[in-house]
């Protein structure tokens, strides 16, 4: 099943994924606090429209509307018993759209985090997390997903649990983390740390990388950090369309289609081959990204100064990939 | 360093060394050691309030600084807060008995339409870790929940969290309602969440936007200190 991804990479050199799910659904009337996954059942026409928007804009691949479709997240809406079913439907709708596209379009089954913190600092056990992910993964594969797509993960333990769950059903997968805290994930994983983590896994993803996070600049810095650690598989860059701004009671992402077109080319120059958007990325952004990727060749690896100049400043001075130069705390003897 | 030198007997340390050791033990999230340290200081005749402020709160302040500076991350902070809680459990009844001054009470919740809770939970744990009393209203709170809680008169600080760009404007609804009811100025209103920024905090009339849980704690402390100064002035 991941042959489809490989084939596209072989023929095209890169893959354009989709953009935002939430931002698009809110524009179609989704109320804040509602579970988007319920729309797979209630409004399949709108989900078809969501997927179709990405396909028509030139995406080679789109994610299913199942990000929060695991039992732990659905529990907040008293729908925990529907995780497998809602995930399955999200992929079925996707399959239909992809098969009608008239070209190779990949359906990627989205799997977001459980929202719980894992043991020992939190309450979720590894076994429970595996069970939760396996249930969702099973539904997505039943519905016809070509590949499973784990995204926005912060904790290495959760990434490992998802990998094990997907390994249990033998499906191909990709997995990205969200680097939103001073260039690291909320749980402290650095970009090069993720490369090491993936290298050490038993059931490896086809591709890995970063999604969401802060702005386009930070995301590209993360991809640069991963490239520098010599990954042995494709890198994924799915960044937000700029940074959300509050204007007259409404939220706007400040990334224009022009900026995202430039971001896509820079992402490829940084070493990513599977490129797309995340929050705030609409079909018009995707179309501009497709155009810029097609009309240019992969260029030289940019440096941080160039990224900041083109995409804006970074959210933090460093991202944990270089040795700390500042003062470190003088510690007393450690007790064990 | 040999294994023998590694062994530290807490009860053999001087007060000053023990306090410093407790800061390190909090940093490392060692709950049992913190509980032992608290008990030793109490046995030596320390006031519960001094144990709280000099050993625990000061230790968590260091954790907060390193969290803010990107040296520690969420997992370490949660372990530290958990160790702090162990010490607090011993001190709490004693603090009540001795009528020690309280740092402040906070009510916190994620706003209506938003079901995210990790950020809010972190703030709750860090605030408790710093010695504040926190009532957690949970997720998806309509304005009535906040007002009802504030009207009990138990709280000094209102904390609101939102992780969605679509739900963050609801914070303004809550603040506007407080203004209408003439109760806005009785409280310190702190807001936080990934898509927020300082500009947004100002625009909706909050007292402060807090970038992360460590900043929330420091900001709460500042506002409580100002409030105490006003009362005594």
Image (cartoon, coloured by chain):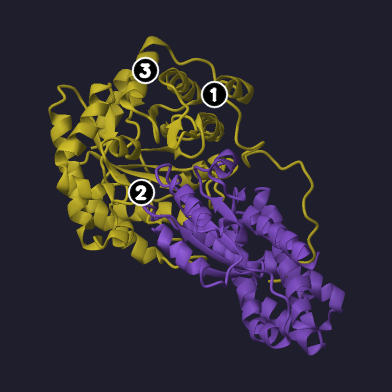
State the image coordinates of residue B47 (x, y, percent, origin top left).
Answer: 79, 83
How far apart marks 1 and 3 lie (CA) works out to 16 Å
- Judge from the rendering whether residue A43 lies leftward or rightward of residue B99; answer left or right: left
- Judge from the rendering whether residue A151 lies leftward or rightward of residue A226; answer left or right: left
How far apart marks 2 and 3 lie (CA) works out to 27 Å
Residue at the limit of the structure toward the top, as seen here: A295
Disc number for residue A311 = 1
| Disc 3: which residue | A288
Front: mark 2 or 1: 1
Q: Colour of chain B?
A: purple
Q: Are marks 1 and 3 on the same chain?
A: yes
Tell me the quarter of the picture where residue A82 sits.
bottom left
State the image coordinates of residue B146 (x, y, percent, origin top left).
Answer: 47, 62
Q: CB under 8 Å between callouts 2 and 3?
A: no
Secondary element under disc 3, as helix, strand or loop, is helix
Q: Residues within 10 Å of mark 3 (few under 14, many from 20)?
A: many
State the image coordinates of residue A18 (x, y, percent, origin top left).
Answer: 32, 30
Task: Answer whether residue B186 is visible to the viewer in this image.
Answer: yes
| Disc 2: which residue | A112
State the image coordinates of residue B62 (x, y, percent, origin top left).
Answer: 73, 60
């Amino acid at each position: 099943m991941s042959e489809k991804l490989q084939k596209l990479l072989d023929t095209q050199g890169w893959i354009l994924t989709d953009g935002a799910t939430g931002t698009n659904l809110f524009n179609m009337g989704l109320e804040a606090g509602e579970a988007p996954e319920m729309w797979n059942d209630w409004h399949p026409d709108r989900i078809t429209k969501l997927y179709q928007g990405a396909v028509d804009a030139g995406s080679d691949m789109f994610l299913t509307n199942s990000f929060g479709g695991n039992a732990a997240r659905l529990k907040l809406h008293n729908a925990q018993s529907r995780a497998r079913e809602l995930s399955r439907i999200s992929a079925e709708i996707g399959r239909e759209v992809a098969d009608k596209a008239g070209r190779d379009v990949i359906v990627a089954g989205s799997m977001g985090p459980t929202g719980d913190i894992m043991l020992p600092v939190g309450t979720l056990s590894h076994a429970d997390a595996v069970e939760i992910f396996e249930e969702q993964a099973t539904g997505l594969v039943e519905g016809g997903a070509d590949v499973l797509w784990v995204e926005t993960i912060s904790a290495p333990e959760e990434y490992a649990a998802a990998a094990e769950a997907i390994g249990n059903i033998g499906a191909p997968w990709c997995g990205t983390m969200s680097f939103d805290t001073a260039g690291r994930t909320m749980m402290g994983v650095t970009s090069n740390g993720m490369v090491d983590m993936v290298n050490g896994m038993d059931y490896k993803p086809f591709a890995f990388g970063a999604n969401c996070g802060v702005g386009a600049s930070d995301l590209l810095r993360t991809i640069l950090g991963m490239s520098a650690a010599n990954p042995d598989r494709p890198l994924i860059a799915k960044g937000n369309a700029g940074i959300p701004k509050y204007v007259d009671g409404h939220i706007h992402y400040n990334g224009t289609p022009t900026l995202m077109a430039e971001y896509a080319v820079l992402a490829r120059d940084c070493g990513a081959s599977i490129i797309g958007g995340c929050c705030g990325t609409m079909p018009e952004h995707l179309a501009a990204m497709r155009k810029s990727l097609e009309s240019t060749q992969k260029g030289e690896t940019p440096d941080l100064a160039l990224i900041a100049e083109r995409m804006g400043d970074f959210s933090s001075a460093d991202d944990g990939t270089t040795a700390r130069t500042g003062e470190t705390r003088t510690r007393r003897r450690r007790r064990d | 360093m040999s294994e023998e030198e590694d062994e530290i007997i807490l009860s053999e340390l001087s007060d000053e060394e023990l306090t410093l050791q407790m800061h390190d033990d909090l940093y490392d999230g060692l709950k049992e050691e913190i509980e032992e340290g608290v008990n030793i200081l109490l046995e030596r005749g320390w006031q519960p309030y001094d144990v709280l402020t000099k050993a625990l709160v000061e230790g968590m302040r260091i954790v907060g600084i390193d969290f803010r500076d990107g040296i520690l991350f969420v997992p370490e902070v949660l372990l530290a807060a958990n160790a702090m809680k162990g010490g607090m459990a011993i001190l709490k009844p004693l603090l009540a008995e001795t009528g020690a001054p309280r740092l402040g009470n906070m009510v916190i919740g994620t706003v209506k339409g938003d079901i995210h809770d990790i950020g809010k939970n972190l703030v709750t744990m860090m605030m408790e870790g710093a010695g504040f009393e926190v009532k957690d209203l949970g997720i998806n709170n309509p304005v009535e929940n906040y007002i009802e809680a504030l009207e009990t008169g138990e709280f000094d600080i209102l904390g609101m969290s939102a992780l969605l760009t679509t739900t963050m404007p609801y914070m303004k609804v809550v603040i506007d309602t407080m203004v209408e009811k003439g109760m806005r100025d009785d409280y310190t209103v702190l807001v936080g969440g990934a898509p927020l920024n300082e500009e947004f905090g100002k625009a909706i009339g909050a007292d402060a936007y807090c970038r992360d849980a460590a900043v929330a704690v420091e900001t709460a402390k500042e506002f409580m200190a100002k409030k105490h100064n006003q009362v005594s002035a």
